[in-house]
Amino acid sequence: MSPVLVVAHDQNGLDATRDALSFGRLVNPVLACADISDVQDYLSSDSPPPAVVVTELHLPTGDAADVLRLIRTNVALRRTPVVVISEGASADDISTVTALGATAYLDRGVAVDVLVGVLRDADLPWAITPPAAPAPVSARRLLEVAR
């Protein structure tokens, strides 16, 4: 099964994307890269090509435009969907990633189901698990959530 390649410079970004995929019952493996050099290393390895790339706009080294250039100049990956996530991007940033072929730009505050919807609309062979029966919630967990 093809992985989802997440390019996020912090654990929170990675966890949020994993949560979104899990929430949408998408069980493709999620692989993480922290910056553009990690993406270059991954793409030049013998690892399976990603089914989709979800990248933050700003990275410690490079940015989503650099990720898009790597993907779009590789003939084997040219059609790979790339979703860019950011918080408060400028119109110029959005124009740049759109011109470079981003499949979608999503604001970080967007609902989880929007990310999953974008990924599903990409018409990829996702592995989708059936809905699970709701797990019982303990009173302690309810108190933790309420805080």
Image (tube, rainbow, N blue to C red):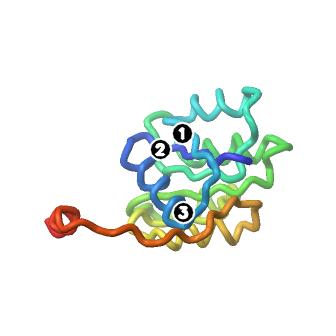
Q: Along the line of sight, which residue is nearer the eye, 29 or 141?
A: 141
Mark 2 lies on residue = 8
- Disc number at residue 79? none
Mark 1 lies on residue = 32
Report x, y in % for residue 71: 72, 44
- In the rendered picture of this protein, how many numbered marks are placed on residues? 3
Element marked by disc 1: strand
Callout 3–callout 2 Cβ contact below 8 Å: no
Mark 3 lies on residue = 94
| Left or right of 99 in this view: 105 | left
User: Does 4 sit above or below residue 45?
Assistant: below
Q: Disc 3 and disc 2: Cα gap in Å? A: 18 Å
Element marked by disc 3: helix
User: Does 26 sit above or below residue 77?
Assistant: below
Label 2 or label 1, whichever comes before in sequence order: 2
Label 3 or label 1, whichever comes before in sequence order: 1
For discs 3 and 2, the disc positioned in front in the rendered view: 2
Neighbour tally class for label 2: few under 14, some 14-19, many 20 plus, Cα within 10 Å: many
Neighbour tally class for label 3: few under 14, some 14-19, many 20 plus, Cα within 10 Å: some
Residue type at mark 3 is Ile
Q: Disc 2 and disc 1: Cα gap in Å? A: 7 Å
Q: Along the line of sight, which residue is nearer the eye, 112 or 135?
A: 135
Element marked by disc 2: loop
Report x, y in % for residue 14: 45, 47
User: Does 3 sit above or below residue 141?
Assistant: above
Report x, y in % for residue 27: 61, 55
Label 3 or label 2, whichever comes before in sequence order: 2
Q: Along the line of sight, which residue is nearer the eye, 31 or 26?
A: 26
